[in-house]
Amino acid sequence: MHEMGLMDAVLRMVTRVCEEEDVGRVDAIVLEVGELSGVLPHFLRECYEAIIEDTPYEHTRLEIETVPGTLYCHDCGHEFRPDLSDLRCPQCLSRNLTPRTGRDFTLKEIIPVFEEEDGESGDEP
Ligand SMILES: [Zn+2]
Protein backbone atom coordinates (compact mmCIF):
# COMPACT_ATOMS: atom_id res chain seq x y z
CA MET A 1 0.00 0.00 0.00
CA HIS A 2 1.21 3.45 -0.92
CA GLU A 3 0.44 4.91 2.50
CA MET A 4 2.35 2.15 4.24
CA GLY A 5 5.54 3.09 2.41
CA LEU A 6 4.95 6.73 3.23
CA MET A 7 4.49 6.11 6.92
CA ASP A 8 7.57 3.94 6.94
CA ALA A 9 9.55 6.77 5.37
CA VAL A 10 8.07 9.26 7.84
CA LEU A 11 9.08 7.16 10.84
CA ARG A 12 12.58 6.76 9.50
CA MET A 13 12.80 10.51 9.01
CA VAL A 14 11.50 11.12 12.53
CA THR A 15 14.06 8.72 13.92
CA ARG A 16 16.86 10.50 12.12
CA VAL A 17 15.75 13.94 13.28
CA CYS A 18 15.42 12.69 16.85
CA GLU A 19 18.94 11.36 16.78
CA GLU A 20 20.31 14.56 15.34
CA GLU A 21 18.46 16.77 17.78
CA ASP A 22 18.75 14.44 20.72
CA VAL A 23 15.03 14.05 21.29
CA GLY A 24 14.25 11.31 23.75
CA ARG A 25 10.59 10.54 23.35
CA VAL A 26 8.15 11.89 20.82
CA ASP A 27 4.75 13.09 21.95
CA ALA A 28 3.32 13.72 18.52
CA ILE A 29 4.19 13.68 14.86
CA VAL A 30 2.50 16.35 12.79
CA LEU A 31 1.99 15.73 9.11
CA GLU A 32 0.72 18.13 6.53
CA VAL A 33 -1.29 16.41 3.85
CA GLY A 34 -2.43 18.27 0.78
CA GLU A 35 -5.86 17.47 -0.57
CA LEU A 36 -4.32 16.94 -3.99
CA SER A 37 -1.39 14.85 -2.81
CA GLY A 38 -3.31 11.65 -3.40
CA VAL A 39 -2.70 10.58 0.19
CA LEU A 40 -5.75 9.67 2.21
CA PRO A 41 -5.55 10.69 5.87
CA HIS A 42 -7.62 7.78 7.16
CA PHE A 43 -5.34 5.28 5.43
CA LEU A 44 -2.36 7.07 6.90
CA ARG A 45 -3.81 6.61 10.36
CA GLU A 46 -4.44 2.93 9.82
CA CYS A 47 -0.92 2.39 8.54
CA TYR A 48 0.48 4.42 11.37
CA GLU A 49 -1.27 2.32 13.99
CA ALA A 50 0.09 -0.82 12.37
CA ILE A 51 3.60 0.44 11.91
CA ILE A 52 4.23 1.83 15.41
CA GLU A 53 3.48 -1.41 17.18
CA ASP A 54 6.48 -2.54 19.21
CA THR A 55 8.47 0.55 18.33
CA PRO A 56 9.51 3.53 20.49
CA TYR A 57 6.59 5.39 18.88
CA GLU A 58 3.89 3.20 20.34
CA HIS A 59 2.56 6.09 22.44
CA THR A 60 3.26 8.80 19.92
CA ARG A 61 0.21 10.54 18.51
CA LEU A 62 -0.22 11.23 14.84
CA GLU A 63 -1.66 14.60 13.95
CA ILE A 64 -2.72 15.25 10.41
CA GLU A 65 -3.31 18.74 9.11
CA THR A 66 -5.07 18.91 5.80
CA VAL A 67 -4.00 21.57 3.35
CA PRO A 68 -6.78 22.65 0.99
CA GLY A 69 -6.07 22.07 -2.64
CA THR A 70 -6.46 24.83 -5.21
CA LEU A 71 -6.16 24.55 -8.95
CA TYR A 72 -5.37 27.17 -11.54
CA CYS A 73 -7.09 27.10 -14.90
CA HIS A 74 -4.82 27.97 -17.81
CA ASP A 75 -7.71 28.67 -20.13
CA CYS A 76 -9.60 31.28 -18.16
CA GLY A 77 -7.29 32.13 -15.28
CA HIS A 78 -9.74 31.00 -12.64
CA GLU A 79 -8.37 29.69 -9.37
CA PHE A 80 -10.59 27.41 -7.37
CA ARG A 81 -11.01 24.62 -4.87
CA PRO A 82 -11.78 21.58 -6.97
CA ASP A 83 -14.42 18.99 -6.49
CA LEU A 84 -12.09 16.01 -6.16
CA SER A 85 -14.42 13.70 -8.02
CA ASP A 86 -14.60 16.04 -11.00
CA LEU A 87 -11.39 17.89 -11.73
CA ARG A 88 -12.59 20.50 -14.16
CA CYS A 89 -12.65 24.25 -14.10
CA PRO A 90 -16.11 25.25 -12.84
CA GLN A 91 -16.12 28.32 -15.11
CA CYS A 92 -15.07 26.98 -18.48
CA LEU A 93 -14.96 23.21 -17.83
CA SER A 94 -11.35 23.05 -18.98
CA ARG A 95 -9.06 20.30 -17.74
CA ASN A 96 -5.97 22.35 -18.48
CA LEU A 97 -5.23 22.85 -14.80
CA THR A 98 -2.22 23.16 -12.54
CA PRO A 99 -2.26 22.63 -8.80
CA ARG A 100 -1.33 25.75 -6.85
CA THR A 101 -1.54 24.37 -3.34
CA GLY A 102 -2.31 21.08 -1.68
CA ARG A 103 0.04 18.87 -3.63
CA ASP A 104 2.47 18.18 -0.86
CA PHE A 105 2.88 15.64 1.83
CA THR A 106 5.28 16.85 4.49
CA LEU A 107 6.52 16.10 7.93
CA LYS A 108 5.67 19.39 9.56
CA GLU A 109 6.69 18.97 13.14
CA ILE A 110 7.99 16.57 15.72
CA ILE A 111 6.71 17.39 19.19
CA PRO A 112 8.92 15.96 21.92
CA VAL A 113 7.72 14.84 25.31
CA PHE A 114 8.61 17.51 27.81
CA GLU A 115 9.89 15.62 30.78
CA GLU A 116 9.67 18.24 33.47
CA GLU A 117 7.30 16.86 36.04
CA ASP A 118 8.67 14.34 38.53
CA GLY A 119 6.40 11.65 37.27
CA GLU A 120 8.00 8.47 36.10
CA SER A 121 11.61 9.39 35.93
CA GLY A 122 14.34 7.31 37.42
CA ASP A 123 14.93 4.93 34.56
CA GLU A 124 18.53 5.92 34.44
CA PRO A 125 20.91 5.68 37.35
ZN1 LIG B 1 -11.31 27.80 -16.66
Image (cartoon, grey):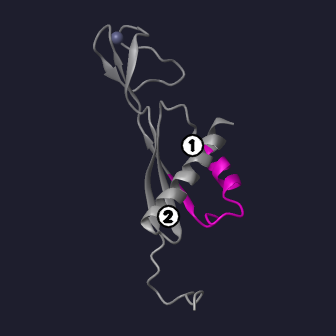
Spatial CA distance of label 1 from label 2 is 27 Å
Q: Which residue is mark 1?
A: 41
CA neighbours of label 1 inside 10 A, class few (<14), some (14 to 19), many (20+): some
Contact (Cβ within 8 Å) of mark 1 with mark 2: no
Q: Residue furthest front?
A: 20
Question: Image point 64% across, 36% down: which residue?
Answer: 2
Apparent side of residue 84 relative to residue 56 in the rendered image (left or right): left
The quarter of the picture where residue 100 lies is top left
Q: Is residue 39 above or below residue 44?
A: above
Q: Position of residue 63 (x, y in %)?
A: 51, 54
Question: Three-letter amino acid code at disc 2?
Answer: Glu
Which disc, if any, is residue 19? 2
- Local SS, label 2: helix
- Dot in front, 1 or 2: 2
- Span of residues in magenta: 44-63
| Figure quadrant, ligand 1 | top left
Q: Position of residue 109 (x, y in %)?
A: 42, 56
- Local SS, label 1: helix
Which disc, if any, is residue 33? none
Question: Three-letter amino acid code at disc 1?
Answer: Pro
